[in-house]
Amino acid sequence: EADIYQTPRYLVIGTGKKITLECSQTMGHDKMYWYQQDPGMELHLIHYSYGVNSTEKGDLSSESTVSRIRTEHFPLTLESARPSHTSQYLCASGFSGANVLTFGAGSRLTVL
Amino acid sequence: GNSVTQMEGPVTLSEEAFLTINCTYTATGYPSLFWYVQYPGEGLQLLLKATKADDKGSNKGFEATYRKETTSFHLEKGSVQVSDSAVYFCALRENTGNQFYFGTGTSLTVIP
């Protein structure tokens, strides 16, 4: 049973709105990741964190930002949403050196 | 660099048919290899893994063998069920880092 939670699961908002996608895990994982999943299903790493106060950009350029103030929490923020941000966002976490990533159920964002 | 190439979909099979989804990889060093599954509306779940050459990962009737000589990790199941309908992702994790690399996903539909 995965102990990683994403909210909201579904969000429909208008252009220009600020949104924050929440991701929390209760497993004490130090590594956390955000992936963007396009309609063709491919996963793109957009942000990751190796611990508190550590954040890095991933392979896919993104206008979103992240923060890691607490180990268990890794929110993703879009200051001004646009239709091109419409996508599924998946959060994942794992221990350093571990071979397993645990994924949340995803947040599906639609920007009108 | 590191990358994963997997068979393009979608794949449609009749119930009880044999399944193969091909996956090959490029990596520096000796990565760990994974298959993840994504059911509709959910995040990814780990299906099976193998951490060294010739290891066989297995779960729920699915199997994959880590073949270093052919840099492959093909997923197989002898008799698929309707409940196996999902998207399957091949992935690798480099042993010297914390990055995971995912294939583009293969959609499987099993019809009764």
Image: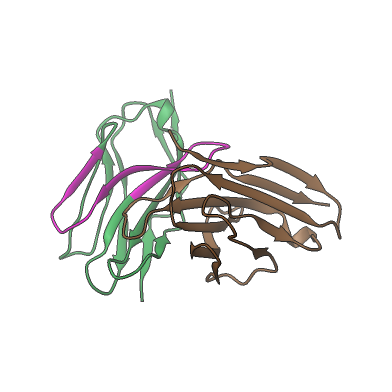
Q: Is residue B22 visible?
A: no
Q: Give the camera-side residue of B24 and B60.
A: B60
Picture residue at 55% right of the left edge, 66% below the top: A53
Task: Point out the residue furthest to the top here.
Answer: B112
Q: How is the image coloured?
A: by chain
Picture residue at 17% right of the left edge, 63% below the top: B68
Rendered view: B32 above or below A55: above
Asked whether, in this view, residue A13 is left or right of residue A58, the answer is: right
Q: Colour of chain A?
A: brown
Rendered view: B85 above or below B34: above
Q: Give the camera-side residue of A93 and A45.
A: A93
Quadrant of the rendered structure where residue B18 is?
Answer: top left
Q: Position of residue A6 (x, y in %)?
A: 60, 43
Quadrant of the rendered structure where residue A11 is?
Answer: top right
Asked whether, in this view, residue A88 is left or right of residue B86, the answer is: right
Q: Position of residue A111 (x, y in %)?
A: 79, 53
